[in-house]
Image (cartoon, helix red, strand yellow):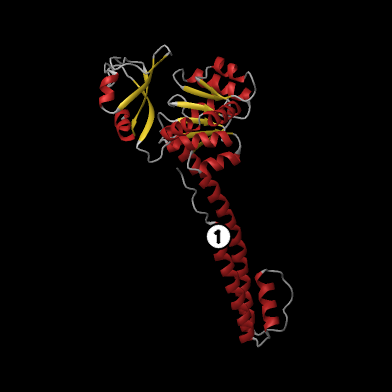
């Protein structure tokens, strides 16, 4: 991720303050030495000369005092114009920095493939993005709110500013090259529009939509979402499962976590001509891979398949086993 360039303003401000104080101090000391004035009169004369106010001299001065006054007047003009230049440079540097950062972000997103897009970086979207990153995936966040985008950038994520319901914003986020999209906007209507647009741009994209109101899940599925999740329904279901079978839930959570556990659960795709195609469930079991279910190409599940079950291309298998073995098998 990009790092915001360090601002040049503090350094310039410090330099400006040092120059003003040094010149004022030098002028004050000059009047005290050359004219023999006290500190108050010397400082007053130095300040009104540096600021080009134009008041009359505090006292009559000789040639040395007049030369010092002329030098201070020139220095005051230089400081004033230098101040304008410093402020202008700081403003332009900040603007250029933002443009460079935006260009770098755009190029970085354009180079991504098989990434995930998260539309809406609220409480749900941020948790989704965090889990995807923990699993080793690149994530692009789409949001229209500057504060959400700033939070996403601070979390080390790629960001795209705009409305996820528009095709141009989805294309900028690389929807045509993405592996999946999660629409977690607070509005059910916006989630439906995001799903419709993303499905039209990438028919092979895996889309998960968030449903809030009752009946929104059906609209999301009709719009093209592969899966629909209602946070409230899932929360209620999880609470009930924890009350009925807590150890089962804890075991599954542990198996699906990305901690340093010796076992895990994974979903693997069987590709045509790939290393899994044509192999039997028994062969995998010998390797320490236990097949819990086979998801057939038509969408049906075959739970606890026998050892003689041969895997075919287009199917998916839900397996459990050693984290190291499953990682090597997935690779």
Whether 143 is drawn above or below 96: the answer is above
Asked whether the viewer can see residue 326, the reply is yes
Image location (x, y in percent) of residue 136: 40, 36
Within 10 Å of the Cα at label 1, are there few (<14), some (14-19), or many (20+) other Cα atoms? few
Q: Quadrant of residue 9?
A: bottom right
Which residue is more in the foreground, 128 or 73? 128
Q: Residue furthest front?
A: 244
Total marks in image? 1
Q: Quadrant of the N terminus?
A: top left
Q: Quadrant of the C terminus?
A: top left
Q: At x 50% / y 53%, what residue is drawn?
A: 6
**What residue is shown at x 54% (from left), y 28% (from top)?**
244
Q: Position of residue 219 (x, y in %)?
A: 59, 17
- As rendered, which of 36 and 145 lies closer to the eye? 145
Q: Position of residue 79 (x, y in %)?
A: 60, 65
Q: Label 1's element?
A: helix
Q: Which quarter of the picture shows residue 273? A: top left
In the picture of the structure, the residue carrying the numbered disc 1 is: 10
Say whether residue 107 is visible: no
Which residue is depicted at the point 48% across and 31% down? 249
Rendering quarter of residue 133: top left
Q: Looking at the picture, tell me which residue is in the foreground, 154 or 68.
A: 154
Query: Measured from the top left, where is residue 62 in percent x and y?
Result: 65, 85
Q: Is residue 91 left or right of residue 306?
A: right
């Amino acid at each position: 991720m990009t790092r915001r360039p360090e601002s040049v303003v503090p350094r310039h401000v410090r330099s400006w303050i040092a120059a003003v104080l040094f010149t004022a101090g030098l002028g004050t000391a000059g009047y005290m030495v050359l004219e023999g004035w006290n500190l108050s009169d010397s400082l007053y004369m130095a300040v009104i000369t540096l600021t080009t106010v134009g008041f009359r001299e505090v006292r009559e001065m000789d040639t040395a005092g007049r030369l010092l006054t002329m030098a201070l007047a020139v220095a005051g003009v230089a400081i004033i114009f230098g101040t304008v230049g410093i402020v202008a440079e700081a403003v332009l540097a900040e603007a250029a920095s933002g443009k460079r950062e935006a260009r770098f972000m755009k190029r970085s997103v354009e180079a991504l493939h098989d990434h995930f897009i998260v539309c809406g970086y609220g409480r749900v979207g941020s948790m989704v993005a965090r889990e995807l990153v923990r699993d080793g995936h690149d994530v692009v966040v789409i949001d229209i709110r500057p504060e959400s985008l700033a939070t996403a950038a601070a979390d080390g994520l790629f960001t795209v500013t705009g409305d996820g319901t528009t095709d141009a914003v989805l294309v900028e986020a690389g929807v045509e090259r993405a592996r999946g999209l999660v629409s977690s906007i607070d509005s059910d209507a916006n989630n439906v529009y995001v799903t419709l647009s993303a499905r039209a741009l990438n028919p092979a994209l895996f889309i998960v939509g968030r449903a809030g109101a009752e009946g929104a899940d059906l609209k999301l599925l009709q719009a093209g979402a592969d899966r629909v999740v209602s946070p409230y329904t899932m929360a209620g279901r999880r609470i009930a499962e924890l009350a009925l079978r807590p150890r089962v839930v804890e075991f599954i959570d542990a198996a699906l976590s990305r901690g340093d556990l010796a076992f895990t659960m994974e979903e693997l795709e069987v590709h045509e001509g790939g290393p899994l195609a044509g192999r039997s469930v028994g062969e995998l079991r010998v390797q320490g891979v236990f097949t819990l279910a086979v998801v057939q190409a038509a969408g049906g599940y075959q739970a606890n398949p026998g050892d003689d079950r041969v895997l075919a291309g287009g199917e998916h298998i839900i397996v459990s086993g050693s984290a190291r073995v499953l990682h090597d098998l997935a690779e």
